[in-house]
Image (cartoon, rainbow, N blue to C red):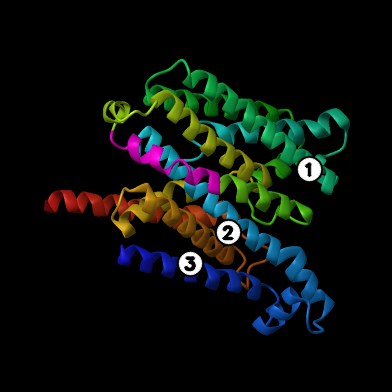
Amino acid sequence: MKRHILLLALIFASILLFFILNLVLGTISIPVGSIWNILSGTGDEPLIWQNIIWKSRFPQTLTALVAGAGLSISGLQMQTVFRNPLAGPSELGISSGASLGVAFIILLSGSIAGTALSTLGFFGEVAVSVAAIAGAMTVMAIIIAISQRVRGNVILLIIGVMIGYIATAIIGVLKFFSNDEDVRAYVIWGLGSFAKVSGNQVYTFVFIMAVLIPLSFLLIKTLNLMLLGDGYARNLGLNIKRARLYVICCSCVITAIITAYCGPIVFLGLAVPHLCRTIFVSSDHRILMPAVTLTGASLALLCNLIARMPGFEGALPINSVTALIGAPIVISVLFGKRKNEITE
C-alpha cells in the first residue's frame, strides 16, 4: 500500500511539472514568475503574454489534463467489462458516431448552404460540438438497446465494431461528394486537438468532466466483481446485465463528451490501463481507478507538450503524438507479460 501511495504521489508530481511546462514552453517562452503573476492577477505583464496564457495555453493545458483522465478511465472500464486487453473507448463505435455527426455538419455544409462551416468561427465550433454529441449519443442508444438483447460481451463488442465500420463507410461517401475545403476541415478535426476548446467552452467542458469522472468511481466495486467472471459475480448478488449497462453508459458518455470537444483522441484510453497494471502490479480497481486518472492526465499533458515544442510551426496533430507514445507502451507491456510467462 505504501508503494502504491508513493507511486501515486510521483505521478501527481509529474502532473504539476507538465502543467507548468505547458504554460511556460511554446513559440514564445514566458518565465514562471510572469505566469504566476498573470494567473493570480498581480504584476504588470505584457498584454500579449496575458492573451497567450488565458486564451491559448491555460485552456489547452486544462483540456489535456481532463481529457486524458477521462479517456483513461473509459478505457479501463471497457477493458474490464469486455475482459479484452485491446478494448478501448472507441471500440463500441461511439467515436465513430461522433465523427459521423461531425461529417454531416462539416461535409454537407458547403454543398447545401454554399458556405463552409469552417469559416463560421465560434458558431461553427458550437455546431460541430453539438453534432458530435448527437452522433455519439445516437450510437450509444443503439448499443444500449442491443445490450439488453445480447448476453455475450464478445457479440456486443463485434456489433460495436461493425457500427464503426458502417459509420466510416458513410463518412467516405460524404467525403466523395464534398468540396476540398470541407474535406480538409473534417480531416483536421479528425486529427484531434486539445486546442479546440477555448473561451467559455473550456469551463463547460471541465465542469461536465468534473461531474462524470467522480461518478465513474462509484463503479469501482462493480468493476472488481466483474473481474471474477459472470458466475461468481452473480452468486455475490451482482445483476450482470444492469452492471454492464451502467459501465457501458459511463464509458460511452465520457468518450462522447471528450470526442465532441477534442475530436477522436486515440491510444490514451488503450495504453494507460496497461501501463498502470504493470506499474502498480494490481488488478484492484480501488488502486487502478485513481492510478489511470492521474497517469492519463500526466500522459496527455506530456503529449500536448511534445506537440507544441518550440521549433515546430504551429502544433503537431495530437493523435500522431499519442500513437507514437502509446503504441510502444502497449507493445512493451505485452512483451513484458510474454517474457514473464516464459520465465514461469
Q: Amino acid at mark 3?
A: Phe
| Number of residue marks | 3
Q: Main secondary structure of the magenta part?
A: helix
Residue 48 lies in the magenta-colored region: no
Q: Residue at x 58, y 37 (%)?
A: 253
Crowd tier of the residue under label 2, counting other residues whose Cα lies within 10 Å: few below 14, some 14–19, many 20 or above: many
Write down the region rendered in magenta: 214-228
**What residue is disc 3 on?**
12
| Residue 102 makes an appearance in the image | no
Q: Is residue 257 visible?
A: yes
Position above or below: 218 against 101:
below
Where residue 82 sits, quadrant-wise, is: top left
Mark before the other along the chain sequence, 2 or 1:
2
Image depth: mark 1 or mark 3 in front: 3
Q: Residue at x 33, y 48 (%)?
A: 284
Mark 3 closeness class: few <14, some 14–19, many ≥20 residues within 10 Å:
some
Say which residue appears at 49% left-offset and 27% top-offset: 160
Does the magenta segment cover residue 223?
Answer: yes
| Rendered image: mark on residue 65 | 2
Q: Amino acid at mark 2?
A: Leu
Q: Under tag 3, what secondary structure?
A: helix
- Residue placed furthest toward the left: 344
